[in-house]
Image (cartoon, rainbow, N blue to C red):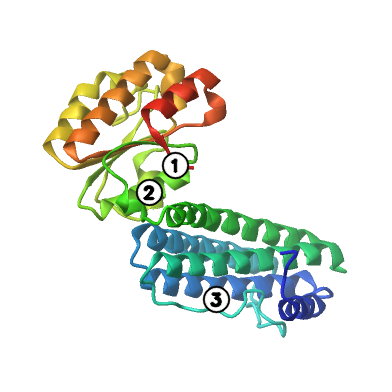
Amino acid sequence: MSSMPPELKKYMEKVIEALRDRPVKEVLSYAIFNEKEEVEYYRKLAERAGRESVRVLFTQMADESQGHHDELYSLFKKLYPGEEPVKVDAPPVEVAPFYPKFEAVDDYLEALEYCMQSELFAEETYAILAQKATHEESKVFFAQLASIENSHYKRLKKAYDLLSSFKAKKMLPEDISPGGYLFPDKIKARYMLLDLIGKGLKPYVFSRDPPKKLLEWFKRDDMTTVWVSKASVKGAMTPKSLVDSKESLAEIMREEKALILIENFEAIVASEGFPRALELVSLLRDVAMVSGSYLLVHAKKNALSRREWAILESELEVIE
């Protein structure tokens, strides 16, 4: 935040001055209350978000903050049995929240940008405190808090970048035409799936993650999830079985408005070879175009050869 406004910089200096000499007990108390406020902040934002991808994102942020709060509280009780965290006389590290009414893409971008700035502010504040704190234990703890805020920022930025790219095209994510799309980033592919679900499409996710983990991430239980694994796991599908089932998947697309997400395509390539994996993608892409369905493919660019990636780009429209 090199271009931080003067008033925000002064606010940061107040936070640092108030916390730099605090012992770890007070720093831990401060963090516990801060995470609690962050939970409420993101819960309220989620309630106001009509766009499914943003609603899920804010819900994830609230759940993660709740998890951090619970971990910090458990640590406090372990270090200080019989005691409770106390309010520390220091300004909150999260800047004053605002809860907009979301109606247009600009509203979402404004909210996400605000949240990103808030997380960066918190990260930078904790990072400076990690350097300036007078207690060694507090230094370590501040560094850990800075890392947490950084992970929040990165999650928010993925959604922001995705929506920004569509705003530049003067369209919404759900405005894309039926067909096949390639995503170098898995999280962006998932956000796209969430926004496309609103078009009445039936979602199918083929992933290296087990179904329970997927459903927890998507914050919904009305989607078909398949674990793609070479291990003999009940309910899982091997990469070979996935490729061999391409005609069945194509038939699903023909019979219903289907939304298929295939994650970690490079793992299928490693198992079955690029030509066979490409047959799967090419068929589903063509059927999607004529049936009103969608195929989303996530692949790590650096895990494929330059030639393989170029062929994928010729078959699928890339969404960065």
Which residue is identified by label 1? 319
Q: Mark 3 and 2 residues: CB-CB less than 8 Å, in contact?
A: no
Closer to the observer: label 3 or label 1? 1
Amino acid of disc 1:
Ile
Secondary structure under tag 3 reads helix
Quick check: 263 above or below 241?
Answer: below
Residue 37, numbered label: 3
Number of residue marks: 3
Can residue 305 be seen in this snapshot? no
Quadrant for residue 260, please give it: top left
Secondary structure under tag 2 reads helix
Amino acid of disc 2:
Met
Residue in view at x 62 percent, y 74 percent? 94
> Residue 49 location, x and y as percent?
37, 68
Closer to the observer: label 2 or label 1? 1
Quadrant for residue 69, please give it: bottom right
Q: Mark 2 and 1 residues: CB-CB less than 8 Å, in contact?
A: yes
> Residue 25 location, x and y as percent?
73, 72
39, 277: nearer the viewer: 277
Which residue is identified by label 2? 192
Quick check: 66 above or below 178?
Answer: below
Query: Does residue 66 appear left or right of residue 80 in this picture?
Result: left
> Which mark is first along the chain, 1 or 3?
3
> Residue 286 location, x and y as percent?
25, 28
Residue in view at x 74 percent, y 58 percent? 143
Query: Does residue 7 appear left or right of residue 231 in this picture?
Result: right
Query: Does residue 185 appear left or right of residue 2 in this picture?
Result: left
> Residue 99 location, x and y as percent?
46, 78
Closer to the observer: label 3 or label 2? 2
278, 74: nearer the viewer: 278
Amino acid of disc 3:
Glu
